Image (spheres, coloured by chain):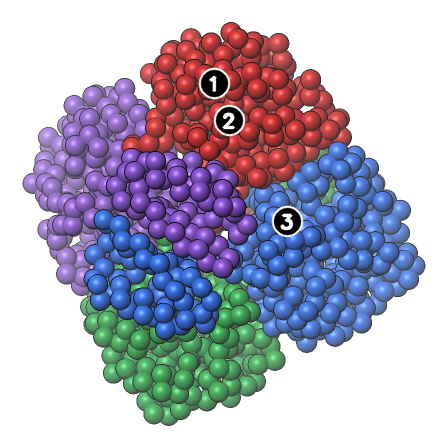
Chain colours: A blue, B green, C purple, D red
Amino acid sequence: MIIIMKTHATMREKSAVIAWAEDAGYKIHLSEGSEQTVVGIIGDGRPLNREQAARMAGVERVVPILKPFKVASREFKQEDTVFPIGSHMVGGKGLVIMAGPCSVESRSQIIETAHAVKEAGAHILRGGAFKPRTSPYSFQGLGEEGLKYLAEAREETGLPIITEVTEPALVPLVCEYADILQIGARNMQNYALLHAVGKSQHPVLLKRGMSSFIEEWLMCAEYILSHGNTRVMLCERGIRTFETYTRNTFDINAIAVAKHLSHLPVIADPSHATGKWEYVAAATKASIAAGADGVILEVHPRPEEALSDGIQSLKPGRFAKLVKQMKAVAEAVDRHID
Amino acid sequence: MIIIMKTHATMREKSAVIAWAEDAGYKIHLSEGSEQTVVGIIGDGRPLNREQAARMAGVERVVPILKPFKVASREFKQEDTVFPIGSHMVGGKGLVIMAGPCSVESRSQIIETAHAVKEAGAHILRGGAFKPRTSPYSFQGLGEEGLKYLAEAREETGLPIITEVTEPALVPLVCEYADILQIGARNMQNYALLHAVGKSQHPVLLKRGMSSFIEEWLMCAEYILSHGNTRVMLCERGIRTFETYTRNTFDINAIAVAKHLSHLPVIADPSHATGKWEYVAAATKASIAAGADGVILEVHPRPEEALSDGIQSLKPGRFAKLVKQMKAVAEAVDRHID
Amino acid sequence: MIIIMKTHATMREKSAVIAWAEDAGYKIHLSEGSEQTVVGIIGDGRPLNREQAARMAGVERVVPILKPFKVASREFKQEDTVFPIGSHMVGGKGLVIMAGPCSVESRSQIIETAHAVKEAGAHILRGGAFKPRTSPYSFQGLGEEGLKYLAEAREETGLPIITEVTEPALVPLVCEYADILQIGARNMQNYALLHAVGKSQHPVLLKRGMSSFIEEWLMCAEYILSHGNTRVMLCERGIRTFETYTRNTFDINAIAVAKHLSHLPVIADPSHATGKWEYVAAATKASIAAGADGVILEVHPRPEEALSDGIQSLKPGRFAKLVKQMKAVAEAVDRHID
Amino acid sequence: MIIIMKTHATMREKSAVIAWAEDAGYKIHLSEGSEQTVVGIIGDGRPLNREQAARMAGVERVVPILKPFKVASREFKQEDTVFPIGSHMVGGKGLVIMAGPCSVESRSQIIETAHAVKEAGAHILRGGAFKPRTSPYSFQGLGEEGLKYLAEAREETGLPIITEVTEPALVPLVCEYADILQIGARNMQNYALLHAVGKSQHPVLLKRGMSSFIEEWLMCAEYILSHGNTRVMLCERGIRTFETYTRNTFDINAIAVAKHLSHLPVIADPSHATGKWEYVAAATKASIAAGADGVILEVHPRPEEALSDGIQSLKPGRFAKLVKQMKAVAEAVDRHID
């Protein structure tokens, strides 16, 4: 930690800052410039509260040196995290494709879609049973019934399933059915939920909050990892900015940055990142070119009848074409899709 | 709902849209311009799914006419919602001042602060027992012990208490101690939590999410109101933007807008909205001038020792001065602080 | 400047950084922690290029210590800048009110408005003759004809006039007529224009760019000040964020921050900061409570006929009422409006 | 244009709106719902001012139907705009690579770089002679001397050159030397400059402003096109958002959207879009996968000595490797790089 003192900080104020750090067991390096004094705090003392330092008299600002996340960081683990989901590896050279409808709407809808996406080349089936909706008056998902239909679809097709869990109390139930737990963007900082999925030891896909710094996202992964649950995938799904033409702004940079800062696999969600099916193919190909370890896509047999997110859902035929294009791009960047 | 068709939409596409709306029981007004056709949907049919319309062939975009929130809206209830908290009314001509530390750190700290803020003119004591923290390694609050200290502080001073509840499972416990439940910005769209506090029938302070549209914020109030819990206060606490000099950008416009769109009281949180104690006084006075029904402020006897948010906490002496300034501004806008 | 080295930086990389700074005439303070090395650069050497440092091998990041603006800063000049415009002082205890239409539309319109705003209490008349418009097909202003009408309005009412200048070549012409040159938000970083108005020695109102950091805004003031033109007013007019309900998000914090960092007067523009006349009064009162040195407001006798920005313009009657409210708020914060 | 009336709009208010549109020569379609009245305005009348409508009594909001840009739109011209720059076509199946330093720093620097980027596969040489810099105290470019060095580099290598023009008065001078005029992000809405480059009939690369809507960007292209200058390239260079880890947020969606809305070629600027050379390769490959018609990249022989933007500049060796990767990605999406 580096503490930059105000231009007119007094000797007494400087001494207080130094004493505070020394009392916690640190060494001090003092740089007195003609205009400003900088206090460098080094060594291994008791954890220091950065906010306390910022509030001390005469302090201009505090610059942290170490990254706030540990277990999630590349410094902690240099090699990429790779783990199997079903018969497929996530995080390696092979990319993973998750596809399916936003919501499970009926038994036949999910089973029809499961067959279609499997045939087109998907490795994992997605589908929401518990839906966090902006309005209390909107369709809220089929709940456990939806989970049962997903399980049936898995039985029929062999595809592992991923579905969202929205509250801590539902984690045991969703774990009974799902292969991967999804944490939605709105719940990225729902810490009780992060603890619950951490404890569950189930694989987790953690979506980035719509206004979260990349470092905050990794801190949320850290919550899950701190329970020894290491099968965490990060998912970039677009952020909220001033631009309204697309539903979100796809932060394509975040894919490379997250992979640079962390060893965890990074999945892209082009459906939410664009919000319009017309742009999903471009965003999907860009994700792979940027280094994503996989994608999660909304596919619906009849989007115009979908109860949610139809506007960003691909039809199975278009999805199948896109899988072929994805394979070409994957090979161009020395990856592959099986 | 108005549906704007693409320039080259075919007769068949237009007919499909019209049939879809008529089947749901609506009347159609068709405007065929030289370049574009617009389909107006009126009357009282079955609820229509706007996303389905957007996904139909030939549709350019869908413009909703009605606001998505109902019970929270001024249309639903024209007069301001006013209700008592302890012996104080919230939402009327008199403004409410909530003050106290970010976190309850010890019995003596909260009791000392309670006396100080009461003496300075606060009506309600704030203090966090369950803290949502960015890092799993930071101080997470004293939990139930903190609630007990808050209750002691109330007994000693007579001040009602407000404290944050962070997960559905904790709602009954927090209701045992607190007079007002606070929903934090990160949990604004934690729907399970909104349902739980809605059912509790306890007064609720609902903070705006850091990247939430004003309409989304009101939709979250709608979740609580939909349980018949009408004692909801909205709280503007700053939004996340590109500007980093302050912790958040205080959306002062949102105060007047929320009061225009809704009948619910609006409280400002200048501590989080600025993130630096030096700017809290300016933001507080601005809130009142803009029409806020009250403020919630962080006050700590020794901010430089605070375990969280010390940098934005006022000392009791400065808080007392600010209360006097607030009274002057309140009177200038035809309100008052008792 | 402080340079934070990467965790695995080599001795050679560290030495290169140290040599680079020493060669420029600086002293080095080295802090070697167990995980990271920090190089503090102090003393008075030749200006260092921060970007060069950031690009050297082994460098993690560079933290500047000194603020980038000099003449605009409080460190450079501690007391507030106060100067006269006509018979009125700007920057002192008395607040300044500028009012008038977005565009000068006709001789009679501007003269009618000038009388109306003067009677209501305005000190300066605003009106645009050269209009930067989003569309090349929109009304672009009356040009020099508009300036002449403004000058006539000044003769009739005695009000000094402020008008926008949009390109360097127009500065001499606009200086012939105007008492204050306005730099619009879109032109905040039009450096050729900043140089031209700096050289003109005319008073300048510098609007903040819609996505400018406060520090960038002050750097643009520095461009003007660097020509010895010290009569610069900063103008906060709202920033662009994700929120779309209002035209801009009024960054009320920026008023207090700009006054803290700089000695220059700060004027608020509630018309653009809200974009809807219904919210202008609340934003105006908030500006004054937050410490603004004045406001600039759009007033039009018949907003529904205005050729630009009618939606955010007040009618004279409402403006007159607002001036009374402004006076009350000004007194509540120990300022006054004459 | 569709006008949505307020819930309680009176008959008189509705009539006034209708009369206003009818007087301008339009037909009216009136939809009276139980809660709200919607006025559809169709046909070919005199241009209507949307802001006037919004300001009329009883009007809730105004929804425009037609896009504000005309000549730039796909509706106006369905096939892609393709034109030659030197011996290379822009906008067709072949992609264009522009590369070179941020600033021309010396004769030898630009000539060395020109040879290096040509050898690696670039088609056009970039380099800044007039630099818009945040600080008046930073290096401002070599001016005309820099243009001369660029021209020498072109003579030696045969590469056409692109360089930024920052003010209308400089357009004739820059046109003497440059093959393509670049409009920087800060000047996107410098309308005097847009008119000047429009009149020049030189090819133009128009960077998107850092907080510009895609539609505003296309409106600025419209300014240039309105002079009959059809050789305009759009350039996405990242937008300003809350995320600070990268210099900008690369709006990868904007590439596909701009190509959907307009027939103009779209070039990506991964150097500014990331601001860190480590992420430039990922962003470049993503651009091509997303459908960009080319890229503009910063390349410097010794970035650690660059006078500007060294942190985001590639060394020639790394650039050469990237060109090979770009070729592979281009072929994967059915494009090519010669």
Q: Residue furthest left?
A: C87
Query: How would you rate the neighbour count of disc 3 (Cα within 10 Å): few for under 14, some for 14-19, many for 20 or more?
Result: some
Which residue is pictured at 40% across the width and 55% down the height? Answer: C31
Query: How would you rate the neighbour count of disc 1 (Cα within 10 Å): few for under 14, some for 14-19, many for 20 or more?
Result: many
**In this rendering, position of residue B240 left or right of residue A124:** left
Q: Residue D300: give its label.
A: 2
Q: Position of residue C167 (x, y in %)?
A: 31, 24
Amino acid carrying label 1: it is: Ile
Q: Secondary structure at mark 1?
A: helix
Between marks 3 and 2 in the image, the one whose residue lies nearer the viewer: 2
Instruction: Report how far apart the C-alphas of labels 1 and 3 lie in the structure.
Output: 34 Å
Q: Which residue is mark 3?
A: A259
Residue B221 vs B248, above or below: the answer is below
Question: Which quadrant would residue C247 be assigned to in this image?
Answer: top left
Q: Secondary structure at mark 2?
A: loop
Q: Secondary structure at mark 3?
A: helix
Which residue is pictured at 19% across the width and 30% down the height? Answer: C227
Q: Which residue is mark 1?
A: D110
Amino acid carrying label 2: it is: His
**In this rendering, position of residue A132 left or right of residue B306:** right
Q: Are marks 3 and 2 in contact (CB under 8 Å)?
A: no
The chain containing the residue under callout 1 comes to: D
Same chain check for tags 2 and 1: yes
Q: Are marks 1 and 3 in contact (CB under 8 Å)?
A: no
Decide which of B122, B5 is in the foreground and name it: B122
Amino acid carrying label 3: it is: Lys
